[in-house]
Image (cartoon, rainbow, N blue to C red):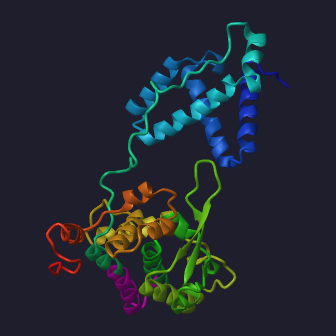
Amino acid sequence: MVALHPEDAMFEAMLRGWRAQQAARGLREDAVGARERLMRRFGEFTNEYPWNWEPSHVDEWSLSLTAEQHLAPSTIRTYQCSLRLFNDYLCDSRYGWVAACRREFGPQTHPVPIVHEWNTIPHLNDYEGDPEARPFTREELQRFLDYADEQVERAVRAKRKGALAAYRDATLFKVLYGWGLRRTEASKLDVVDFGRNPAAPEFGRFGTLNVRYGKAKRGQPPRRRNVASVMGWAVDAVADYVENIRPRFDCAEHAALWVTERGGRIKPAEINARFVAYRDALKLPRALVPHSMRHSYVSHLTEDGVDRRFIQCQVGHEVDSSTAVYTHVSSDFMNTALRRALAPALGHGPAGQEGR
């Protein structure tokens, strides 16, 4: 067995210690592993060990991520944050790496802080996603859902395979919008995730939806949330699917809500592929993506006058600024809100009548 060089052995020990520290904080194994791989790539980029890393290395690395790899600012910031965490860990006297490097490599050789405010991307905006991203208009959404329903009718008339899958997909898109879900959240739903809501008995067993795989904070497990059903037509659609269509997939033992004809669980990539096929067939803007359904849910409920805090809880946002990013209200809504705001100044009552 070949022993590592002292430098390699020290670097590996640092990474093992950092892995243990992150595990103690409850971070997921895949997140810890991704960070470790990133530190190895940074070491390969600099061709130096951590005790020889300098701030200029961060400058050069960040420039390569921007100019050569063309990564998004949010991605680069995430990488820089991971590097900062590892560097802070090494420089923290409580973990002893500075002293260990001095003993092993000389009194002047040890980790120093290399990540600071002058060589990292600041977080100045609440939203840094694609500026083209937007929700459906109500007319676009109706066209999309109608087209999805038409695919079922066409398959039935042609007496060809695929009618069940088309029905499943049409219902899935209604659930994406009707409960404001992300694509991955929807793909991992089980039939038992629907339940009764005493406050809405008219929806029966579909009064609330338990989302078990909500978007996680970095390194943390998925976040759960309960979403109250608010759209009766969407409840009718999923109830019909569960009671009359899903059993015909012959998968009674499978827990998944959305099953394939081969008895598996539908994957997010399959949802995306069917969405793109329908969108392009209708010649709708390419800016519309499955996540636009979630944006539409927030925007349309806002236009309908639903309380903002309720919407925030429904979609699982911790802060209102996140919900605000999703809100794209129509011109009609803005005009109505404007007239409501101007009414007191113009001496009109809330219903447009002159004040007394």
Q: Is residue 88 left or right of residue 167?
A: right
* Residue positioned 62% across, 38% down in the render: 35
Taking the view exactly as shown, the residue that stands out farthest to the top is: 107
* Residue positioned 53% across, 36% down in the render: 79
In the foreground, 221 or 44: 221
Q: In what quadrant of the picture does the C terminus appear?
A: bottom left
Would you say residue 210 sits in the magenta stretch? no
Does residue 195 sit above or below 59 in this rendering?
below
* Residue positioned 75% across, 43% down in the render: 24
Magenta span of residues: 146-163
Principal SS element in the magenta part? helix
Instruction: Name the spot of residue 205 as percent of width and height, x first.
Output: 59, 88
In the foreground, 237 or 276: 237
- Is any part of residue 261 visible from this angle? no
In the foreground, 326 or 136: 326
Instruction: Name the spot of residue 208 as percent of width and height, x first.
Output: 56, 79
Taking the view exactly as shown, the residue that stands out farthest to the front is: 356
Would you say residue 159 sits in the magenta stretch? yes
- The quarter of the picture where residue 233 lies is bottom left
- Is any part of residue 324 visible from this angle? yes
Instruction: Name the spot of residue 178 as percent of width and height, x first.
Output: 44, 77
Taking the view exactly as shown, the residue that stands out farthest to the right is: 1
Label count reads 0
Instruction: Name the spot of residue 301 as percent of width and height, x first.
Output: 37, 73
Does residue 322 sit above or below 332 in this rendering?
above
Q: In what quadrant of the picture does the N terminus appear?
A: top right
